[in-house]
């Protein structure tokens, strides 16, 4: 895995091949570790594109194996104060 410091360079190299401002393509069924650009803390997200077309998102702190609860908001409204796994469902009714 490339170091986070090399990620922007990687994106620049791939930019010519991407269309519509896409930075990364998520592989289906593989958990991807994203790290926040933060000087004070090691933290980020774990994102998985699920087999059913939805997404699973988790927040990690200190180490990607340490999933921490976070407050979950939907349309600006707090839904849960200590959510650990957020699933975004697939929209089968959307036109292709």
Image (cartoon, grey):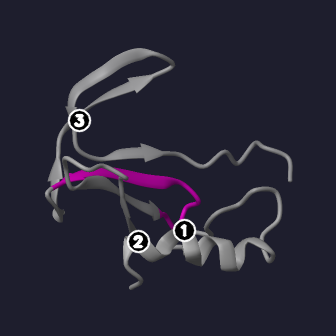
Q: In the structure shown, which secondary structural element does the residue marked by tag 1 occupy?
A: helix
Q: Position of residue 43 (x, y in %)?
A: 25, 53
Hey, which quadrant is residue 53 in on the image? Answer: bottom right
- CB-based contact (under 8 Å), mark 2 and mark 3: no
Q: Nearer the viewer, residue 64 or 72?
A: 64
The numbered dot on residue 5 is 2
The numbered dot on residue 70 is 3
Q: Position of residue 34 (x, y in %)?
A: 39, 61
Q: Position of residue 80 (x, y in %)?
A: 26, 25
Label 2 CA crowd tier, 10 Å (few <14, some 14–19, many 20+): few
- CB-based contact (under 8 Å), mark 1 and mark 2: yes
- CB-based contact (under 8 Å), mark 1 and mark 3: no
Q: Who's the residue at 41% across and 14% down the image?
A: 77
Hey, which quadrant is residue 1 in on the image? Answer: bottom left
Work out whether mark 1 precedes mark 3 in sequence or the reverse, and give the earlier one: 1
* Magenta highlight range: 49-61
Of circles 2 and 3, which is in front? 2
Q: Position of residue 62 (x, y in %)?
A: 14, 57
Q: In the structure shown, which secondary structural element does the residue marked by tag 3 occupy?
A: strand
């Amino acid at each position: 895995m490339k170091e986070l410091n090399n990620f922007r360079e990687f994106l620049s190299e791939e930019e010519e091949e991407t269309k519509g401002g896409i930075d990364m393509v998520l592989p289906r069924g593989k958990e991807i570790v994203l790290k926040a650009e933060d000087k004070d803390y090691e933290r980020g997200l774990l994102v998985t594109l699920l087999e059913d077309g939805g997404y699973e998102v988790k927040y990690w702190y200190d180490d990607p194996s340490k999933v921490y609860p976070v407050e979950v908001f939907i349309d600006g409204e707090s839904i849960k104060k200590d959510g650990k796994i957020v699933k975004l469902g697939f929209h089968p009714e959307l036109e292709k």
